[in-house]
């Protein structure tokens, strides 16, 4: 099998060299890039499986680059930046990042996060309940999930674009209907880690899913909040 291709995008050559060398020594093929323009060229010529994107590229808006990736390509996206402000993290997740790592970072932790995102975007998942529904296609309300192709279709059969993280979260909900799921449970099942005291990853992704699934996101009927406990997936789920 071909090694996973990782694009490392940072304006500092020392950082791209460090990351490319580290990833290359662990079985990945890494491309070093220093601008959003270079990344877009690579996406057309040799699209990577995952992008490590620095937000602080000179003269460029990292959030705009992230949004372009999500609108035009399907790949893992991990934002790696020195901007550790909580607002930046939320915005990064809002534009579709699968994970967010702040500098300085531990190389081993970064590697673990890269592998976790690649597992999710490759469709590899873990069991999420003692007796989960396990079908190639699941339907709820007017929606259909195709697990094998990681696709979501509306009532007319049209595909709905989801990020890797959104799709993983929806699958966890669909395999656990009628059960209150805590944020820690959801984060562990979708990202393989526990929530920090101010971690809003799950809340952000639930809000994004509601905007795509609900007729009225302000009064959700599919994914309901349970005060102090987590979230409840309301519809019945059946094999399509």
Image: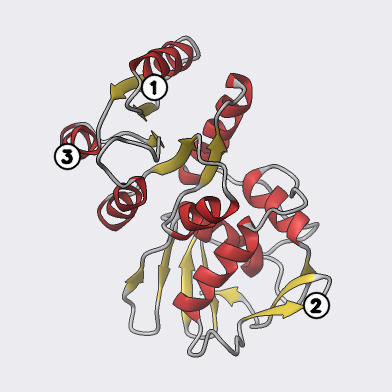
Look at 36% across and 51% down and name the residue there.
63
Q: Position of residue 70 (x, y in %)?
A: 33, 54
Look at 27% across and 26% down and name the residue there.
33
- Badge 3 local density, few (<14 within 10 Å), some, or many (20+)? few
Q: Which mark is residue 44?
A: 3
- Badge 1 local density, few (<14 within 10 Å), some, or many (20+)? few
Give the total number of marks visible in the rendering: 3
Left or right of residue 40: residue 223:
right
Pair 3/2: label in front: 2
Pair 2/1: label in front: 2
- Dot 3 falls on a residue whose secondary structure is helix
The tag earlier along the polypeptide, 3 or 2, is 3
Q: Is residue 155 above or below residue 191?
A: below
**Which of the pair 21/86 is nearer the observer?**
86
Q: Position of residue 196 (x, y in %)?
A: 75, 48
Q: Position of residue 51 (x, y in %)?
A: 38, 36
The alpha-carbon separation of the residues under discs 2 and 1 comes to 44 Å
The tag earlier along the polypeptide, 1 or 3, is 1
- Dot 1 falls on a residue whose secondary structure is loop
> Picture quarter containing residue 103?
top right
Q: Is residue 132 above or below residue 66?
A: below
- Badge 2 local density, few (<14 within 10 Å), some, or many (20+)? few
The tag earlier along the polypeptide, 2 or 1, is 1
Look at 61% across and 88% down and name the residue there.
221
Q: Which mark is residue 3?
A: 1
Q: Quadrant of the N terminus?
A: top left
Q: Which mark is residue 227?
A: 2
Q: Is residue 234 above or below residue 78?
A: below
The alpha-carbon separation of the residues under discs 1 and 3 comes to 19 Å
Judge whether residue 194 can be spotted in this image.
Answer: yes
């Amino acid at each position: 099998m071909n090694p996973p291709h990782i694009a490392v995008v940072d304006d500092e050559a020392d950082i791209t060299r460090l990351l490319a060398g580290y990833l290359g020594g662990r079985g990945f093929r890494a491309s070093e890039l220093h601008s959003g323009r270079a990344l877009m060229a690579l996406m057309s010529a040799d699209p990577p499986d995952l992008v490590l994107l620095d937000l602080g590229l000179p003269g460029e808006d990292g959030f705009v680059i992230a949004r372009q990736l999500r609108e035009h390509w399907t790949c893992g996206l991990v934002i790696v930046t020195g901007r550790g402000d909580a607002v930046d993290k939320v915005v990064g997740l809002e534009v579709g990042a699968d994970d967010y790592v702040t500098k300085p970072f531990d190389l081993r932790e970064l590697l673990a996060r890269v592998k976790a995102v690649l597992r999710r975007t490759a469709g590899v998942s873990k069991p999420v309940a003692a007796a989960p529904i396990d079908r190639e296609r699941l339907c709820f309300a007017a929606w259909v999930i195709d697990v094998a192709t990681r696709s979501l279709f509306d009532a007319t059969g049209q595909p709905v674009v989801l990020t890797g993280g959104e799709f993983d979260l929806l699958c966890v909900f669909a395999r656990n209907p009628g059960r209150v799921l805590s944020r820690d449970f959801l984060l562990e099942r979708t990202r393989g880690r526990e929530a920090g005291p101010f971690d809003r990853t799950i809340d952000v992704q639930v809000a994004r899913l509601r905007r795509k699934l609900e007729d009225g996101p302000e009064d959700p009927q599919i994914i309901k909040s349970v005060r102090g406990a987590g979230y409840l997936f309301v519809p019945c789920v059946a094999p399509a």
